[in-house]
Image (spheres, rainbow, N blue to C red):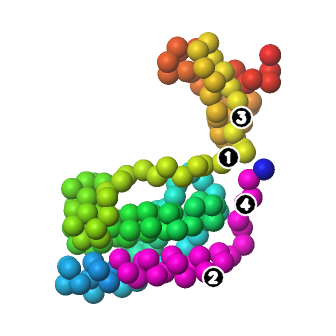
Amino acid sequence: MQPVYKKRIPIYLHNQVLACLRQHLAQANKILQSEYTEPKITYRPKGSVAGSAFLTRWEIQLNTTMLHENDKTFIEEVIPHELAHLIVFKKFGKVKPHGKEWQYIMSAILGRTPKTTHNFSVHNNNNYLYYCLCQEHYLSKVRHNKIQHNKTEYLCRKCGTILKLRNSI
């Protein structure tokens, strides 16, 4: 069973997050001749999203579980990625999330490779195993409950058959 990190982030990890953030923010401010302030950092203990940038709140939210499991790699990849979103919003306004402006900030300003997705493992013990004629499917608890309460049916995109719960044979 995967541990869920509901408590506070250890101070050493939070300090590493802040150090990375401050380094990249200083670099961006110097190159862009700007004075962007340090965004608020918040933590969320679940989900498949590594990080989120809340543009109007000037906030970066990080996945606690992924941070604990991948520490330095996670920090070095996710912090610049989300910071770039905030800087792009301040500098260019509302534009395509991973568009040319974001790619420019990531590569030319922050010196990072512009990657739109992460490769961190996502553990989710709340998935339910369903099957069709051609493969197995993992459905979330929400989708599973909708099926169980006869509110919907899900079809396989490949073979078009209705998905069935593996344990209900």
Q: Amino acid at mark 1?
A: Asn
Residue annotated with mark 1: 124
Q: Amino acid at mark 3?
A: Tyr
Image quadrant in which the C terminus is located: top right
Looking at the image, residue 146 lies above or below residue 75: above
Visible in this render: residue 48? yes
Q: Amino acid at mark 4?
A: Val
Residue annotated with mark 4: 4
Would you call the spot at circle 1 few (<14 residues within 10 Å), some (14-19), or many (20 or more)? some
The residue range painted magenta reads 2-24
| Magenta: main secondary structure | helix
Rounded to the nearest whole Å, what is the CA distance between mark 3 and mark 1? 10 Å
Pointers 2 and 4 in contact (C-beta within 8 Å)? no
Would you call the spot at circle 2 few (<14 residues within 10 Å), some (14-19), or many (20 or more)? few
Give yes or no for residue 22 being in the magenta stretch. Answer: yes
Rounded to the nearest whole Å, what is the CA distance between mark 1 and mark 4? 10 Å
Q: Nearer the viewer, mark 2 or mark 1?
A: 2
Q: Earlier in the sequence, mark 2 or mark 3?
A: 2
Residue annotated with mark 2: 11
Residue annotated with mark 3: 128
On the image, which quarter does residue 110 sit in? bottom left
